[in-house]
Image (cartoon, rainbow, N blue to C red):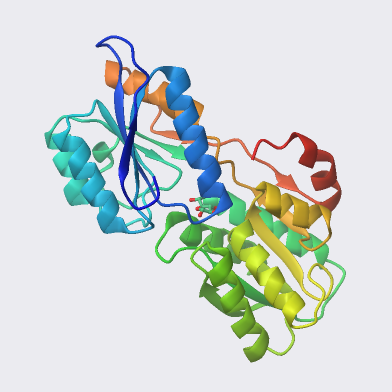
Amino acid sequence: SGSGGTTSASSGGGDSTVTMGFSQVGAESGWRTANTKSVQESAKTAGITLKFSDAQQKQENQIKAIRSFIQQRVDVIAFSPVVESGWDPVLKEAQNAKIPVILTDRAVDSKDTTLYKTFLGSDFIEEGKKAGQWLVEEYKDSTDKVNIVELQGTTGSAPANDRKAGFQEVIGADTKFQIVATQTGDFTRAKGKEVMEAFLKSTPDIDVLYAHNDDMGLGAIEAIEGAGKVPGKDIKIITVDAVKDGMQALADGKINFIVECSPLLGPQLMDLAKKVVKGEEVPARVVTEETTFTQDQAKQALPSRQY
Ligand code: GZL
């Protein structure tokens, strides 16, 4: 799908086949690649014809894709909104065209919740809290200041906003925890490395890095090692996702704790889509099941990880 194009994967089969238009954020991270695979494979398994568009992390491309799906009269539209705001006009166009919309992975901040049938995805505030809880536990016997730097996800995205808020809510209870630098790394390794290099130059003693996804954490590890420091020891690292490369770094001791964010939303998405097309009731919110991993748990889990 690469250059923001739209590909169609038809599953064949009679006229009762459901056609879904899916607008994906992009291909910015290992998580996103795994999510795309889950959606595409699940559509095939479910016998749903999938029109898939990659927006290269640009909201205007997602809006264009949704308009194109409306033109093509698809039966249902699903998308992962790259940012929370600015969706009402195009969602109203879908509603006027009587095409139901499903939010998957990320949420929108529209006040009018009739604009979509359901939101399937993780509770990002909970993920931020889990990261904070590990840190509180890790430093429970210390009263020294803990200098934290934070690599935020894509500016304006639900995971970035909520992972920041959940983490802050938990560590805010103890003033020894200080976020001394925070900046977006746009969920990518390259940007995570670049921003961490800047943090290392501008911030003398960093104790902890909180990265909103594994990919930025892995980029930061390159920067930390480039500065002659030991990741996981000189600077403790907490990330979110638990994709294979992140879990490997956790097992190798370069990351200290990972909060899982499951990308395997495909099967549930297709079930919800079929129900929605039939006009059946679906829950307004479907929260993803997910857990956390320590270094020892990563060693155990790695062999059976699906992504
Ligand atoms: C979270 C998802 C985020 C991942 C990142 O559900 O939207 O986007 O945490 C990905 O890895 O880029």
- Picture quadrant where residue 209 is located: bottom right
Please indicate whether residue 305 sits to the left or right of residue 166 in the image: right
Horizontally, residue 201 falls left or right of residue 11, namely right
- Tell me: residue 284, above or below residue 244: above
Can you say whether 115 is above or below 127 in the image? above
Q: Residue 109: x and y, percent?
A: 33, 53
Residue in front for this viewpoint, 45 or 270: 45
Most distant residue in the top direction: 14
From where the camera sits, is residue 122 visible?
no
Q: Nearer the viewer, residue 34 or 139?
A: 34
Apparent side of residue 261 relative to residue 26 in the rendered image (left or right): right
Image height of 175 relative to 49, above or below = below
Instruction: Quadrant for the N terminus, please.
Output: top left
- Taking the image as shown, residue 151 lies to the left or right of residue 186, namely right
The image position of residue 279, as x and y in percent, is 27, 18
Residue at point 35%, 53% (across, down): 3
Is any atom of residue 270 visible in this view?
yes
**Image location (x, y in percent) of residue 159:** 49, 55
**Residue found 43% across the figure and 48% down from its top:** 106
Residue at 22% over, 49% down: 64
Q: Is residue 158 above or below residue 12?
A: below
On the rendered image, what quadrant is the C terminus found in? top right
Question: At which x and y percent is residue 42?
Answer: 48, 26
Q: Residue at x 73, y 50 (%)?
A: 247
Which corner quadrant of the image does residue 80 belong to? top left
Q: How many marks?
A: 0
